[in-house]
Image: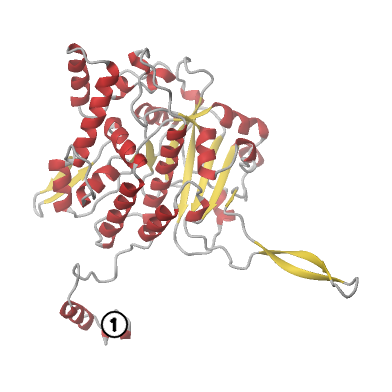
Amino acid sequence: MDPPADWHQLQSAFRLLSYGSPFWRVYADEGKETGLTDRDIIKGLSEHALQKLLSTDCKPDTLTNAQAMALLGSTIQPRLNRASDLEAKLVSSHASTCMNISTPQLILTSQYPSQFTLSSAANQYLASDEASLIRCIQVLASINRQSLIGPGDVGELVSRIILLRAMQKTMQKTQPAADTETHSENIMMPFGHSVRLVDFLQTLTGWNKNDLKLGSIDKENQEELLTRGQVFWNHFISIDHTPTSAGLLRKLYRGLAVHCKPNQASFDQLFTIYLQSSPTEALDERNVTFCGIQVKNLKQNDNIKEQASKWTPKDAKMKLQGRNPYLVLYFCLNDFRPKKPRLHPKKLKSTSSATSITLETPTPLPKITHIPDGKLSKEEARRRASLAFYGLDAFPFLSEKLVAVLKELLDSDPPVLQLPENPSELDCEYVYGASPEVFSLDKAD
């Protein structure tokens, strides 16, 4: 497939139909032959994509486990582990792809490869109904407690949900106006248009453009990022390589962000930023840069000063064609910074005399700040923009209910020994008795 010629073609719904299942393209071509309008074709395909994911043409009162995982699979791609029953349902009824069947153990492995059409439908559904997103996260937490989620830190899943939600909110605020005269090449899918990087950062922080303090990046490079930076993605896939600028451009063509390979240096997630001068100019690899996300969930000393100098394309071994400015986001999902905040003196005058009394007044630590440079070179510091977020309540676009259920997901590590679902008293007595010193005395007794 030929790459898009310019930014308009990049976002074209009819171009994006060519990725994934050939059904989407065939449906569109036949729809045109029968006289359907371009908008009706895209609307019909979006509705059909959602029906494929949910395996129903009616909105369910409560999402089943399989429906929830289908919506998450096509957007943040959690990896299931030895969950053959669930994966069989996803393949047979919810548009997942069978990747492998291990014949000795009859273990089925499935996945949702990058298909923009499915991701568009899932985003539209989840963005319009927070209760459904909450239900999806609850299902994910339940499955994780059963040790059915693949290897990796659950914090990385949470970070993908946060980033996806920020993208949904930004797309909702910047939705292009519908125009019946729009050329077919300029028609876009629901939740399938690009957004300015500055708009995405305003959603992420709740700050105005003029209040965006992005660390040590110099004025010229920050202006270039915020003025020219464009972002285009609506789903994640997991990759097994370190992308180059050419690879980042190919991922831009598909409208996807990436979850990095295991043990990838420097970053856990990446998405492409394109420095655009004009929407009609030819797409050029030299205008490619990126946002790298580093995620921490474990309770440990925050040695960010030592680590931060390694959050660069060089340390990540990313071969980029141009030395463009780039963005690094640090998500500390549990704020474990010292409880004692910094202190500053405050003078109070006594009512009985002119004597001044100096008190130490606590100053709360900011929830959003920039990443320290540490040993970063001056040249690198001038082109690296950065933001650090501490705690789930640092993200102003997340509702209280979403924050609560994301905390539930963060705390959903499987128990040391798995009890049956809804265990009886006899089940508990047997497991506790057969596992000396594993459980606390009050349980064992």
In the rendered image of this protein, does residue 298 appear above or below residue 277? Answer: below
Whether residue 349 is situated above or below residue 108 in the rendered picture:
below
Q: Which residue is denoted by mark 1 in the rendering?
A: 443
Relative horizontal placement of residue 383, taking residue 193 as reference (left or right) = right
> As rendered, which of 44 and 157 lies closer to the eye?
44
Observer-nearest of 208 and 294: 208
Q: Position of residue 263 (x, y in %)?
A: 39, 50
Q: Residue 291 placed where, x, y %?
A: 49, 38
Quarter where residue 16 is shown? top left
Q: In the image, is residue 135 above or below residue 216?
A: below
Residue 20 location in percent, x, y? 24, 29
Which quadrant would the N terminus be assigned to in this image? top left
For residue 300, side relative to residue 165 (left or right): right
**Residue drawn 14% across and 53% down?**
85
The picture places residue 157, in percent across and down from the top left corner, at 36, 50
The outermost residue toward the front is 351
Instruction: Please state, as top left, top right, bottom left or bottom right, where the C terminus lies in the image.
Output: bottom left
